[in-house]
Image (cartoon, helix red, strand yellow):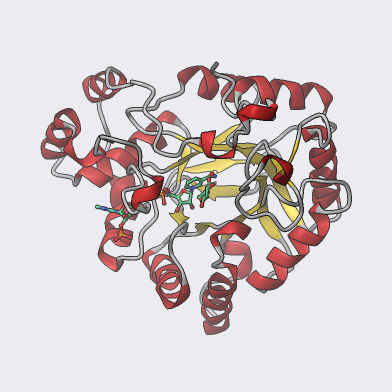
Amino acid sequence: MKTLQFDNKDTVHAIGLGTWKATGNKVKQAVKDALYAGYRHIDTAAVYGNEVEIGEALAEVFAEGSIFREDVFVTSKLWNDAHKEGQVIPALQDSLSKLKLDYLDLYLVHWPVAFKNGVNFPQKPSDYYSLEEVPLIETWKQMETAKDSGMTRHIGVSNFSKKKLQELVSNAKTKPEMNQVELHPLLQQRDLVDYCAQENIFVTAYSPLGSGDRSEAMKGEDEPNLFEIETIQNIARKHNASIGQVLINWHTQRGTAVIPKSTSEEHIRENFKAARIELDDSDLKEIESLDRGQRFITGTFFEEPSKGYVDIYDEA
Ligand SMILES: NC(=O)C1=CN([C@@H]2O[C@H](COP(=O)(O)OP(=O)(O)OC[C@H]3O[C@@H](n4cnc5c(N)ncnc54)[C@H](OP(=O)(O)O)[C@@H]3O)[C@@H](O)[C@H]2O)C=CC1
Ligand SMILES: O=C1CO[C@H](CO)[C@@H](O)[C@@H]1O
């Protein structure tokens, strides 16, 4: 399995398990299945509402005695309602106690947007803080404290544009070590990925399979299906691999991490084995030509245009 190596020599498997939309016993079993299949990288977030079950799965597997805490890389994320001064450490403490862990491997600022405390999903303009009221650097300084205190070994961000990263990098004591963003052949974000490489910021690809299990309300009109792209189907056939494996492998060859979500034991195993294939130059060229700026997760959900609060992707 390819790994990414941090400055302090900690490593993370390039293929991890995503857990959004996976709850209850299903996510608990999925985490166990993943660990037994060889995964050592689990992605969750406070807002996914599954940290307790993931914590139970980890505790039960660790108690069996053949996989240890230090073998597994656990990521969680700060929700948007705890960005303000004094709120980050308690939010991280809450994630740690739900996960039954003494430390996280990676803690991410989930979105570059701040809500009032207790707001999960904003309903009205007064649910937001503007970035002037709660600047990202104020949140980031608390992330730095979290790292310095040992509550998390690494800190990073998610859904940050190049512009927002540049601002953070020029004002931060500790640079973000990771940016977790949506990436797949229809959304390659080359400029952002190149900038991160240049700044030694690792990248993790989310929704690599097109996030087909989102609720209908979260889906856009006429969304494409990554499993139906002919180019990818042909490459899969050529390598005697599944379409999912090609979609996953592309990221590891690109040098990023990738976190496909699954609660199916079969898919969990299949996705991990994506590491075994090797795409060649002509495959990579063909995939490169598929880029078309297609987002499945649109942060416009969190924008508040009437107040001009947030431009999530800085693409306007
Ligand atoms: N930082 C952020 O803002 C975000 C982070 N994420 C993270 O990224 C992870 C992955 O993204 P997500 O949006 O969940 O979606 P994915 O792109 O990983 O797609 C998940 C869907 O693909 C299916 N699937 C998994 N493996 C296969 C396979 N081999 N063949 C066919 N279908 C398959 C799953 O079904 P089944 O379970 O039945 O296998 C599920 O329906 C999240 O779970 C979360 O951890 C996601 C969105 C935003
Ligand atoms: O990680 C994610 C998935 O869940 C959230 C929505 O419910 C998203 O906001 C977020 O990006």
Residue 129 in the image: state x and y as whole percent: 76, 39
Judge from the rendering whether residue 282 lies leftward or rightward of residue 151; answer left or right. left
Split into 4 quadrants, where in the image is the C terminus?
A: top right
Q: Relative to residue 283, is residue 21 depicted above or below?
A: below
Depth order, front residue of 211/271? 211
Q: Relative to residue 26, is residue 95 depicted above or below?
A: above
Residue 6 in the image: state x and y as whole percent: 65, 40
Judge from the rendering whether residue 233 lies leftward or rightward of residue 25; answer left or right. left
Q: Relative to residue 279, is residue 117 depicted above or below?
A: below
Residue 307 in the image: state x and y as whole percent: 69, 28
Depth order, front residue of 288/160? 160
Depth order, front residue of 161/58? 161
* Residue under the image location 58 percent in, 78 percent down: 59
Residue 127 in the image: state x and y as whole percent: 71, 46
Q: Relative to residue 45, is residue 166 depicted above or below?
A: above
* Residue 8 seen from this side: no
* Residue under the image location 31 percent in, 49 percent down: 212
Q: How many marks?
A: 0
Image-quadrant location for residue 75? bottom right
* Residue under the image location 54 percent in, 67 percent down: 50
* Residue under the image location 27 percent in, 22 percent down: 290
* Residue 32 seen from this side: yes
Judge from the rendering whether residue 287 lies leftward or rightward of residue 30; answer left or right. left
Judge from the rendering whether residue 225 lies leftward or rightward of residue 118; answer left or right. left
Depth order, front residue of 133/57? 133
Image-quadrant location for residue 247? top left
